[in-house]
Amino acid sequence: MAQPEADKPTKAKRQRFRFISNKKAAAGLIILGIYVVIAIIGPWVAPYDPDARGNDLVQPPSGAHWLGTTHLGQDVFSQLLSGTRSVMFVGFFAGTVATVLSVLIGVTAGYLGGRTDEGLSALSNVFLVIPALPLIIIITSTLESAEDWLIALVIGFTSWSWNARVLRAQTLSLRRRDFVDASRATGEKTWRVIVFELMPNLTAVIASGFVGTVIFAVLSEITLAFIGVTSGTTWNWGTILFWAQGQQALAQEAWWWFIPAGLAIAILGTALSLINFGIDEFVSPRLRSVGKTKIKTVDGRTVRMRIGFTPVLSRSAAPHTHATPTPVIRKEVTQ
């Protein structure tokens, strides 16, 4: 009787760390953690001032300049390190703002229903059909100094509607469940039902929406910097690409000027996508089993899964399948 009690902490620990044990999620979190560390210490460990000019104009990577220099002799590696903080700040701040708005509006509309649902749903539909990026360009271009926090606010306030619609649909599905009705019957207040009953069941959806919004915010901020809408004095990866494109780095074969920034964008997007895939597999058991071609039976044997075949496991030495052809007996007719 003591053995099941000893197994409980192990099972609870496995359930708690199942998301981290996912290879996609673990790889994405490690890469994202590296980016966060670079964003924090990047401006301090940069070997040069990103604005400092030098005599080495458009020089390839060397020991003095690991990623080469620009047309003004500026160090590209220092610009890349300093620009990471701006990209990560805008991405996470805009993702937080959009997630908070989507949770407040989506969950409230789905749980309360009635006129509240109609009004909040109409508001979500209005923001859903508004083209976000052109609106961001118009707002930021009219401002005298578009700083990072202001760009993040604009992106966050214009990118919450889709997640709000998803959360509303999930809340409509959850509000008629037995555990929610039981909480109402015991006299729980509305905010307690939403916070302690609904929100834990929406955690994965909220996390997935947050990651998607961070990806959109990062790409939007880089796009704004690349087309020259934001201030060129604040360094980010889009600013590096803006100056590289303006000075025709490709025509000068200065690949070190734009390829590192492009790789940084691609790797960050891959890390966030891996985390999103890990969240999807954590929520859906069907996705966790995709790609697994072998299963183990109770007696320890391994059975290989094949497309189109449903294995019927038995105690015999060889597994049987429903797809086993039935022998046809032919009778020869003699004349």
Image (cartoon, rainbow, N blue to C red):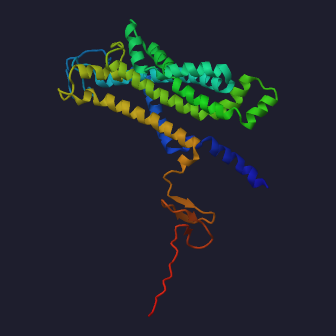
Q: Quadrant of the C terminus?
A: bottom left
Q: Position of residue 293 (x, y in %)?
A: 50, 58
Q: Residue furthest top?
A: 144
Q: Residue at x 48, y 61 (%)?
A: 306
Measuring 67% from the left and 47% from the top, which residue is drawn there? 11
Above or below residue 312? Residue 203 is above
Q: Is residue 62 visible?
A: no
Q: Nearer the viewer, residue 306 or 46?
A: 306
Residue 217 visible, this orientation: yes
Query: Based on the displayed image, in which of its 4 quarters is residue 281 positioned?
Result: top right
Judge left or right: residue 254 versus residue 265: left
**Residue 285, horizontal then vertical, whole percent:** 58, 47
Residue at image location 21% in from the left, 25% down from the top: 249
The picture places residue 205, in percent across and down from the top left corner, at 57, 33
- Relative to 248, say whether 150 is above or below: above
Please name the residue shown 62% across and 21% down the image.
Answer: 118
Q: Is residue 172 left or right of residue 324?
A: right
Q: Where the N terminus falls, by quadrant?
A: bottom right
- Check the image and report above or below for 289 versus 314: above
Indicate left or right for 37 with 243 as reference: right
- Residue furthest to the bottom in view is 335
In percent of width and height, residue 81 lies at: 37, 24
